[in-house]
Image (cartoon, helix red, strand yellow):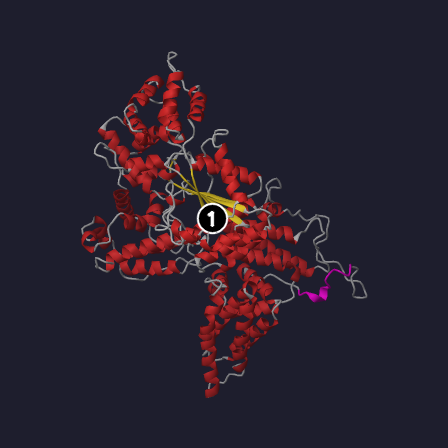
Amino acid sequence: MSQDASKPRKRDKFRAFLGIQPPSRSVSPNPPTPSPSGRENRDSSHPPKAARKIFRRSSSFEKDLVVLSTTYLLQDNAKLRELIVLIVRVRDRDEDDKLVDILHNCGCFSADLAQLSTEDPETAASAIDEFLRTVRAVDSYDHDDEESALETLKLQATCSLSEPISRSKTRRGFSRTILAVVGSGFTILDILKDASEAIGVVPLLKPIFASVASLLRTVQQTQVNFNEMKDLALTAGDFALRLVETCSTLPVVPLEQSNNFSIKGIVVKLDQMALETLPKQGDISGIRAEYMDDSRKMDVEEICKRLFDAAELVVWIEGSAGVGKSTLVDHLSQQLRSAGLLAASLFLSAFPTDSISPETFIKMLSYEVGKNHPEAIPKIMEAMSKCNGLPLQDHVEHYVLQPVRSLVHPHPLIVIVDAVDEWKYHPSFIKTLAPLNSEASTVKFIITSRSKPCSPRLPDFDKISVHTYPLLPVSTDIMKSYFDKYLANVPWVDGRKANAADVDKLADLSGGLPVWASTAISLLLEPFSKFPPHEILFGILTSQRDVDSSDRLAALYRNAIFRLFPTSEAQMYLSQYLGAALVLQEALPLSEFSKLVGMLPHLVKSIRSALSAIETRSPHGSEDMVHPASTRFHLSFLEYVQTIPAENAFAISVFDSHSAVGMTCLNQIVTLPPLSSNQTPGFLLRGIQGYATKYWPFHVSHGTKRSHGEWVKTQHCSTLHAIPIGAQQRWATLFLNTLFPDAEEMAAMEEQDTTSILMKIGSNLREDSGDHWAFEVACLEVAVRLGSGRDDA
């Protein structure tokens, strides 16, 4: 059946993405016939056909891909090629398979050395020389000969002892990537043998395969848009194989000057695809508050002066909740981006940060650098290849500093981190800044927090070159201008609108806090309020009459909640809803959130609608979803609902909320579907089952105490002990599949109790790149509660 010509094929879409024109239909598919002299008419700069080998694809796409990726790693290293030839020869002589395991380790080590040679040539060269001497010594292995046997043992020891050298730059070795891609159908020595024999296949295409290999490795580590990114990576791999197969048969390979072919352009596009696999903060357009023109003119001028005329590495902006720190640095980020001076900006109040590890945070910054400065992407690709398992300081060096340094900008580029104190692990990041004082001509930082930074809470803070900038409330005149502008939009009834005196009172009551003003306006604009705007305005003014200036924001929130939820029953539901939203780790459909919180869907919908009056943020795609509270409300409101004064009937305990959500998640474990043989890696659960699978250890670890005496009294403890071992093993498999959807096969968990299962998972996650650190900690925390029985555990 012919394909609809009007419907673009995936390959054509991919060509368009790479900027490659489709091949002309008038061109013959057959290669040109050589002249009788055996010489083609070509420019002397074109590589001769004799310098290349013809490549034909096999029946295994995955094998072809890793063979050629390995080939291009080997093509410039004669000693490494000799090493592989010798190992293969020893393998071929080992008729009794006595050296199978040893030679497998040798093959893995050689593959890792090939990757290391691109990252640290000096270290790789030394390790290759040492290993080559040993393999040469056993090339004539005779298992009956004692000396040869000793040499074999020496070979095994050398492989074992040298392995840390190859892992020093990347914990996840290239050999593991090869085995993960090709599966169990081929040995690593098969791959290395075929790769060494393919040396000479279109050397010009090496950069493309390097990018494809990097893309495949990074896709294996991503949780972001995994299916889409994997599809793109495999399509890129298919394209690269077709390209090398075609070019290997041509007498002349198109060069850079060809309008239809640009290796550099293809590599750039592939690198951009790999960049998308890094974690990111997502769309923050819905959380931006309006910046009032010139409201912070003097602050902007002073901060910019400190950035570009002073020597400090960090400008630290501190100010109370609601004073406008995020709005100010968002304005600064846009101005710096327009001037080409913004390296990266992260707004930590825009998304839940509980599960963000320090390594993930650095990768998020790196993604921002690449997005703002595409020229820095090649250096980011290098970081993605070499940083797994390295210390956090190395992540900062490779993911942020080197990419920014590669831009060779005449002025320092600025990294903005807003609301750093809302991130639990921010001290680890702050500590990495101390060694960067000498880099202030390359990169500088703007950091905001509610409190003034101090050494006791921040390790090595006293070693960082910092200028602390206190952000004060805006002026009364600015607040009057704000109210004049937005009160005009209020649908007043019967002409009973705010007058000049009301504006003066509102400006005074705001205390110069933009969040107070925006919340008051939101309450007046609420379209479904039971009260007309003039009554709401009267209530705001009278409720604040005898309130101390430091409590006016809390009084405004109190007044709003009592108006929106006037009965004790409504406030009870509000507390239940907000408690779950406060600890929610990712958005859920409204119907699924209803199950998580144990409320009827219509109640959830009503509460969400009422709370829209005091929301300051509107995440993209929030119409039918319930999002984590931190992405919808200002921090000052979330802090208020967590206070516990006697009159606060809707006070919320985050600990209790984690406990309740954790219990709901645990009850889902026994409902998980059975595993079947037709389930493939990448199979993901949806809704509350998917959420419970991923997050129950996190909520239980945050909603229970570590003391054995208190733990054994909880419902969580008894529930975990009551879950059948088969259900626990099924959960563990689905949990790992959720975190690693690209696994070669769905991991089977054979441990026979929950403690062992959690310990095994924690151990596995510890070997990862750091992006699952919070999950590792959560699993180990629950394992300690279940297993040790020690109060000091």
Residue stretch in magenta: 43-53
Q: Residues within 10 Å of mark 1 (few under 14, many from 20)?
A: many
- The residue to which callout 1 is attached is 364
Residue 638 visible somewhere in the drawing: yes
738 lies above or below 151: above
Q: What's the residue at 24%, 33% (across, down)? A: 648
**In this view of the protein, which residue sits in the foreground, 254 or 412?**
412
Q: What's the residue at 27%, 44% (across, down)? A: 655
What is the x, y in percent for residue 710? 19, 52
Position of the C terminus, as image quadrant, is: bottom left
What is the x, y in percent for residue 231? 52, 50
Q: Amino acid at mark 1?
A: Met
Residue 620 visible somewhere in the drawing: no
- Give the residue furthest to the front: 310
What is the x, y in percent for residue 312? 49, 48
What is the x, y in percent for residue 79? 59, 73
Q: Could you tell me which secondary element the residue under label 1 belongs to?
A: helix
Residue 51: say if magenta.
yes
